[in-house]
Image (tube, rainbow, N blue to C red):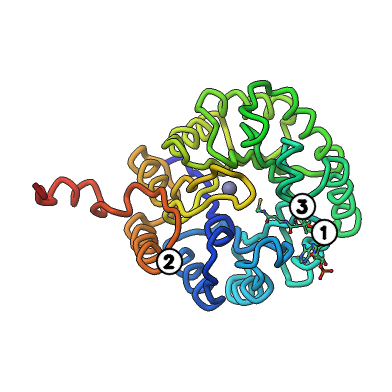
Amino acid sequence: MNRQVEIIEVGPRDGFQNLKEYIPAAEKIRIIEELIGAGVRHMQITSFVSPAAIPQLRDGREVAAAVLEKHPDLDLFALVPNFRGAQNAWETGLRKVTNVISLSSAHNMANIRRTHDQSFAELEKITAALPELNACLDIATAFGCPFQGKQREVEPLLAFERRAYDLGVRTFNLCDTVGMADPRQVREFITATRETFPDVRIEIHIHDTRGLGVACTLAGIEAGADGVQSTLGGLGGCPFAPGASGNTSTEDLVFMLEEMGYDTGIDFRKILSAAKREFKCIDGNYSGANIRVANTIDELAEAPCIH
Ligand code: COA
Ligand code: ZN
């Protein structure tokens, strides 16, 4: 049997959060439904953040409630920056959140205006007040920061993870917020995390700034990541991280992994159609390589030469 890979779609949060023009909630829900129709089973569907910080996702409650009602059995979650966000997510019916804290203190301040101590105090409040909520940790800038540079040593990451581990957090998502990671570094950071915290679930989230999204994500899978995040079309970026560009695209990842014999559970044709539709309808920063080409390798081979 093929080895399974858990692809976690985060486009409805990381893809949409940068877009200035408001996408109506109904359109967001339609795209989420299309993703589910293509086989996506794990998805970050919105965030519960200050509407002043991210106006695009001010409809988080509406979107989450609608999708949860229709798909109670899927692994659906939202990003939160603080206790308030976690509480709102819980009240909406979500049972899993990712609390984002940046490894870089400068980026943490730019993104959520808190010191590390303040952020970990919020995380402690979340785990204490909402013990039934699965509170995961998004470690932003785990591989590098637009203000503090590339993260060359793994020790600060392990010390950071220790703080969350001691609060009971058992899922770490190592985020390459601006696309500074390289495959060797991904392998090293995942291996060190695994050796230090054998009972923790590890995910990665790689931006495709220099075309290394798929390479770094594959390195992560081969190093034993339990789940990998990506966005439809590679739509993405971070409004509080200068230089952040698109994400690793879900359809590129599905294509590569299925060709390699992995089982993603996602239908390439359907996910590519969804990506192409999003590309046509929503103006944004897309890094997906397949968006402009034919649907399968066979079609690619058969496609007439254009010059
Ligand atoms: N959801 C909704 N509103 C929230 C909120 C949340 N999770 N947290 C705070 N607010 C509101 C407060 O009630 C307050 O509203 P008011 O002005 O009407 O009274 C306002 O936001 C400011 O609250 P404060 O605690 O002073 O926050 P801040 O201005 O220091 O901002 C964050 C801190 C974390 C709330 C804000 O920076 C944020 O939401 N950042 C998210 C960044 C993000 O999503 N980045 C991309 C993903 S990595
Ligand atoms: Zn991101």
In-image side of 115 versus 282 (left or right):
right
Amino acid type shown at disc 1? Glu
Q: Is mark 3 within 8 Å of ligand 1?
A: no
Residue position marked by numbered label 1 in the rendering = 132
In-image side of 170 versus 266 (left or right):
right
Sooner in the amino-acid sequence: mark 2 or mark 3 = 3
Residue drawn at the location 79% of the way across and 58% of the way down: 133
Q: Which mark is residue 122?
A: none
Residue 267's place in the image compared with 181, above or below, is below
Q: Disc count in the image?
A: 3
Q: Which mark is residue 135?
A: 3
State which mark lies toward you, 1 or 3. 3
Ligand 1 sits in which quadrant? bottom right
Residue 63 image offset from top left, x and y in percent: 61, 73
Q: Do callouts 2 and 3 mark residues in contact (Cβ within 8 Å)?
A: no
Residue position marked by numbered label 2 in the rendering = 282
The secondary structure type at the circle numbered 1 is loop
Residue drawn at the location 75% of the way across and 42% of the way down: 170
Residue 56 image offset from top left, x and y in percent: 60, 67
Residue 163 image offset from top left, x and y in percent: 84, 36
Sooner in the amino-acid sequence: mark 1 or mark 2 = 1
